[in-house]
Image: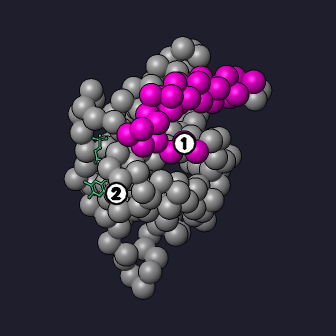
Amino acid sequence: MNILILSGSPKRPGEGLCQSLIQAVQHGVREAGGQPSVLSFSGLPRCRVCGEGWGTCLETQACAFGADGFDSGHQAVKQADALVLVTPVYFGEMSESLKAFTDRLRRCEFSRQEATRGKQALLVASAGGSGNGIVSCLNQMERFCQHTGIKVYDMVGVNRWNSEYKRAALLAAARGLVSALGKSAP
Ligand SMILES: Cc1cc2nc3c(=O)[nH]c(=O)nc-3n(C[C@H](O)[C@H](O)[C@H](O)COP(=O)(O)O)c2cc1C
């Protein structure tokens, strides 16, 4: 099973809370026999809001500016068996880089949901500062899933005080996600 982790972290592997959660997810996926891969989106331009609100995305399910790095991410989502969204909480929301990708993906997938419909996703919000904003961030990610036909497998909120047991929970969640996919395969 190909599990695609969409990362909102601007940091490198091994640095910080959010990356430690990504690592836990990767371990859990591997333990269950899946193949994890990680995509991050630092530097990806946000949606330009073409035309009068919709651009090519509504009719052709493709972004007119997709060559800027968006298309390869869209393709990776198409090929994934399930998704994991992991982001640091910024101002109670996803990081701007993950938001840039999911905003553009939502537009391309909204009408037909060919790459996303029915796929399961594990949603992870890591609030490493005050700990505020987990609920609003998860809510934003859930809305993205609703607009794209993605089924939420679980939502996990992590802060600096609960990260130890939440890392263990994430490992188990990732394992469970892969196992559940194996059971529903034809
Ligand atoms: C612009 C910005 C906004 C942030 N907003 C929040 C927030 O609303 N709630 C919170 O608990 N932490 C907030 N943080 C802290 C981050 O969630 C996170 O802990 C920090 O970026 C370090 O993440 P890391 O340990 O994964 O590298 C914010 C950080 C940045 C850079």
Q: Position of residue 28 (x, y in %)?
A: 52, 21
Q: Is residue 154 above or below residue 145?
A: above
Is residue 176 a member of the stretch shown in magenta? yes
Residue in view at x 67 percent, y 22 percent: 179
**Which is nearer the N-term, disc 2 or disc 1?**
2
- Amino acid tagged 1: Val
Q: From mark 2 to mark 1, how far is it between C-alphas?
A: 16 Å
Other residues around mark 1 within 10 Å, as few (<14) / some (14–19) / many (≥20): some
Q: Is residue 12 above or below residue 138?
A: above
Quadrant of the image containing the C terminus: top right
Is residue 74 a member of the stretch shown in magenta? no
Q: Position of residue 72 (x, y in %)?
A: 37, 44
Magenta span: chief secondary structure: helix
Give the structural element (helix, strand or loop) at label 1.
strand
Quadrant of the image containing the N terminus: top right
Q: Position of 134 compared to 178: left or right? A: left
Residue in view at x 24 percent, y 32 percent: 15
Task: Return the residue found at the far bottom.
Answer: 52
- Amino acid tagged 2: Tyr
Q: Is mark 2 within 8 Å of ligand 1?
A: yes
Q: The magenta stretch spans which residues? A: 155-183
Q: Position of 20 compared to 81: left or right? A: left
> Which residue position is annotated with label 2?
90
Give the structural element (helix, strand or loop) at label 2.
loop
Q: Position of residue 153 (x, y in %)?
A: 65, 41
> Which residue position is annotated with label 1?
156
Q: Position of residue 44 (x, y in %)?
A: 27, 54
